[in-house]
Every structure is written in C-alpha cells, then in structure tokens.
Image: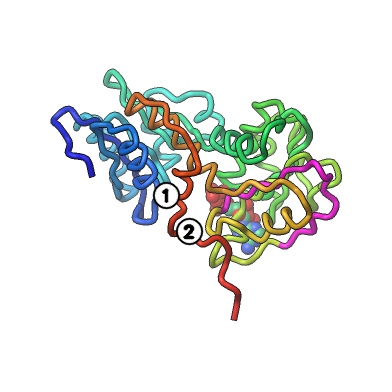
Amino acid sequence: MPILTGKARKAGVLGWPVAHSRSPRLHGFWLERHRIDGCYLPLPVRPDRFADAVKALADLGFAGANVTIPHKEAAFAVCDAVDPSARRAGAVNTLVFRDGRIEGSNTDGWGFLESVREGAGSGWRSEAGPAVVLGAGGAARAVAAALLDAGCPRVTLVNRTPARAEALARDLGGPVAVAERPPLEDAALLVNTTSLGMQGQPPLHLDLVPLPAAAVVADIVYVPLETGLLAAARARGLRAVDGLGMLLHQARPGFAAWFGVEPAVDAELRAFVAHDIPRTLAAAG
Ligand code: ATR
C-alpha cells in the first residue's frame, strides 16, 4: 500500500454490494506498477443514496469513479454530459469529474472488443462476418452495440425471452436480427452474455459443430475462467476468449483519465486479478 500525499488522486467503484468487486485489486495493481500517488477504493452505496454520493465524491476532490450493479442506469441520469457509448447503452460505468462537471461513458463494449482483438489473435476484425449474441440484458446491449458500431455486418440476438431480444433489436437499429436458434453456420463470432455457465448457474448447452473453423467463441462469464462453452470451443479447435479480458480492458479508459497513465493489460495483471478465480468448475459429486 503506497503512502499517500495530500495531493493523492482518488477514484473508486460505486456498487451495492461492492465487496465482490475485483476493480480495487485491478486498479491497485496499476497504481503500484506505475508508483502513482493515488488510491482506488471500494465505495458501497445504497441505491437511494447514489446521486448524493456521486456529488459528494466530486466535492471531495475525487477524479472520478467506476459504477457497477445496480447503479449503471442511475449513473447515466446523474451526469452533466455523456458520450455516445453511454447514450447507446443507456448506462454509465465510468465517471470523470472535470471542471465541476460529471462526465459519463460506458467502456464495457469497447472493453469487450479489445478483449476479443487481444484474445483471438491477429487478424480478428469485427467487419469479418456475422456475430451471434446469446442474451438480451445490459451486457448483450453493450456487446451488440460495440460490434455494430465497429462494422459487424449482422448481429443475431438469441434469448430465452424473445420479446426482450426484439425490444433490444428495435432499440439498437441497424443490421440486427432475432432468432430462436443461433445461426452458427456462417457466424464469425459467438458470444455468451447470459449468466449460463457461471459458477452456481445452470450450464449452457449448445452444439458448436455447425460453427465455421475460423469462428471465435467468447464468453463474458469469468467465474470459472474456462466455461463449458469455451472448453467445447477449444475441443473443436476454435479460438476461445474468456471473460476476464473484458473486465481488464474496460478499466483502462477510467484509469487513464483519473491517474494520467495509459495502463497495459498483460499476463502479469491477468494472473494477479485471476488469483482466486477457479479455472474450471469443480467436478460435480
Ligand atoms: P446483464 O445486465 O448482466 O446482461 P441481465 O439483464 O439480468 O444481466 O440479463 C441476463 C441474461 O441472461 C438475459 O438474457 C437472461 O435471459 P432472459 O432475458 O430470458 O431473462 C439470461 N439468462 C439468465 N438466466 C438464464 C437461464 N437460466 N436460461 C437462459 N437464459 C438465462
């Protein structure tokens, strides 16, 4: 833990609860690596106190904050200005306090794309072919919007509750379809944004045989790191991208804005943040 001066820069993560958040460990790693006079704190705040808490942080000289469940929509409402990523998502995960104003952005979609670019290796481009997105919640919205904005020719949403996927498709606009079964035959990317496959949740059952050999399979679930979906993709010889990369990359813009250093995502950071994340689920029974 560094010794702070009176000029220390301050940021943190607002959530309720926030004890499970890995963001303090992640930002703390970068602060130490770059020997920055600054801190990043877990900031638990009840939903009915959220707006007042944000204004208090600004008054206290914080540089900004991350926002997690359940405050991302409330954070959108509290901002004086939001960028296109936040407007597209209707939600904010990164706040920057600048010149007496509260600015909001949403780095989840960008973080996802960076993670796939890194994890899938050279040559992956969102323009390369259609994507299939499983789910229709906030994470699906961020992922689908980022893909569309990056030139993906078609995004197909597949969700347990089709009406939710239809509503999201209407909202997103552009080349978005809704299907009952994932059209895997011509997919360049398959993404799971549901909670299926997460520790404590039911598994995701999907036959990956129809996917082309060049397809990339990504999961935003990162507990465990190697979900059943990713294990099945690797067994088929497909490129697989785990959910930890999205968590790491979405943090970069906030850190750069608050602390003035562009941080890197590398193997050392991954290992540090993943230290307590199981690689696979313990075998049942
Ligand atoms: P987030 O904001 O993290 O995306 P969310 O809005 O709660 O979270 O969305 C969770 C997603 O996982 C939804 O697409 C949900 O499907 P529904 O819209 O039908 O609820 C999906 N999901 C969660 N549990 C599921 C299950 N047991 N089977 C299928 N889909 C599930």
Q: Is residue 142 visible?
A: no
Question: What's the amino acid at mark 2?
Answer: Ile
In depth, the one of 169 and 24 nearer the eye is 24
Q: At x 52% / y 37%, what residue is drawn? A: 108
Farthest residue, direction bottom:
285
- Tell me where the magenta segment starts and ends, as one range: 205-221
Farthest residue, direction left:
6
Which quadrant holds the C terminus?
bottom right
Q: For residue 29, which quarter of the picture?
A: top left
Q: For residue 263, which quarter of the picture?
A: top left
| Location of mark 1 (residue) | 272
Dominant secondary structure (helix, strand or loop) of the stretch shown in magenta: loop
Q: Is residue 208 magenta?
A: yes
- For residue 277, which numbered disc appears in the image? 2
Q: At x 72% / y 54%, what residue is drawn? A: 234
- Residue 211: percent from left, percent from top: 82, 48
Q: Is residue 246 visible?
A: yes
Q: Is residue 262 magenta?
A: no
Q: Is residue 28 left or right of residue 201?
A: left
In which of the image's four quarters is ligand 1 placed? bottom right
Q: Mark 1: which secondary structure?
A: helix
- The colouring scheme, among rainbow, by chain, secondary structure or one colour, is rainbow
Q: Mark 2: which secondary structure?
A: loop
- Residue 44: percent from left, percent from top: 30, 50
Question: What's the amino acid at mark 1?
Answer: Phe
- Residue 278: percent from left, percent from top: 51, 62
